[in-house]
Image (cartoon, rainbow, N blue to C red):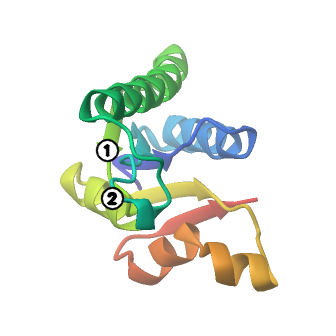
Amino acid sequence: MYKRILVATDGSKLSHKAVETGIELASLAGSELVAVKVVPRYPQSYFEGSVPLSVDEVGRIEREWSDHGQAVVDAVKAEAVAAGLKAKAVVVRSDLIAEALLAAAKKHKCDLIIMASHGRRGLKRLLLGSETQQVLTHSTIPVLVLR
């Protein structure tokens, strides 16, 4: 059925639902689980919404974000391994979340993506965008979306 399942997580309660489903499905299918967290880069200009900081301070903040992201995917990997699965923990640094998830799925030869959707509608969706919608629109492999 599925050989390698990518589970997108941000460490939130909602994304944990995707993690639990991914682990269950991987167990049933005998699949490997690839846990992925996309970590943004710190905005570098005033126009991107940042407060001007030194290069060292920006580096420190980005390391904190990466370390937190690594802790999130390491926890998912540990949960998957405890369930008897082979698993990988992957942190990707990018401001383009959907593109980063699709690239990770391709790089790790995943044949299913599982992710959560916040279910935003109307103006919030228009203003904030939908990474899930972008993944659904551009993915060449099946995508399971949970709410």
Q: Which residue sits furthest right?
A: 122
**Along the horizontal axis of the image, is 105 left or right of 128?**
left
Amino acid type of the residue tagged 1 in the rendering: Val
Relative depth, front residue between 24 and 145: 145
Task: Locate residue 45, reporting x and y percent.
Answer: 35, 59
Residue at 19% across, 53% down:
107
**Along the horizontal axis of the image, is 144 left or right of 92?**
right
Q: Tell me the crowding category of disc 1: few under 14, some 14 to 19, or many 20 or more residues within 10 angstroms, Cα based.
A: some
Task: Tell me if residue 42 comes above or below residue 126 in the rendering.
Answer: above
Q: Name which of mark 2 and mark 1 comes first in the sequence.
A: 1
Task: Locate residue 29, reporting x and y percent.
Answer: 48, 44
Residue at 23% across, 54% down:
109
Residue at 49% across, 46% down:
7
Q: Tell me the crowding category of disc 2: few under 14, some 14 to 19, or many 20 or more residues within 10 angstroms, Cα based.
A: many
Give the quarter of the figure containing the N terminus.
bottom left
Task: Locate residue 93, reporting x and y percent.
Answer: 31, 45
Element on which disc 1 rests: strand
On residue 92, which mark appears?
A: 1
- Label 2 to label 1: alpha-carbon separation: 7 Å
Label 2 belongs to which residue? 100
- Residue 21 seen by the camera: yes
- Residue 88 seen by the camera: no
Q: Are marks 2 and 1 in contact (CB under 8 Å)?
A: yes
**Along the horizontal axis of the image, is 60 left or right of 121?**
left
Give the quarter of the figure containing the C terminus.
bottom right
**Along the horizontal axis of the image, is 126 left or right of 105?**
right
Element on which disc 2 rests: helix
Hey, which quadrant is residue 77 in on the image? top left
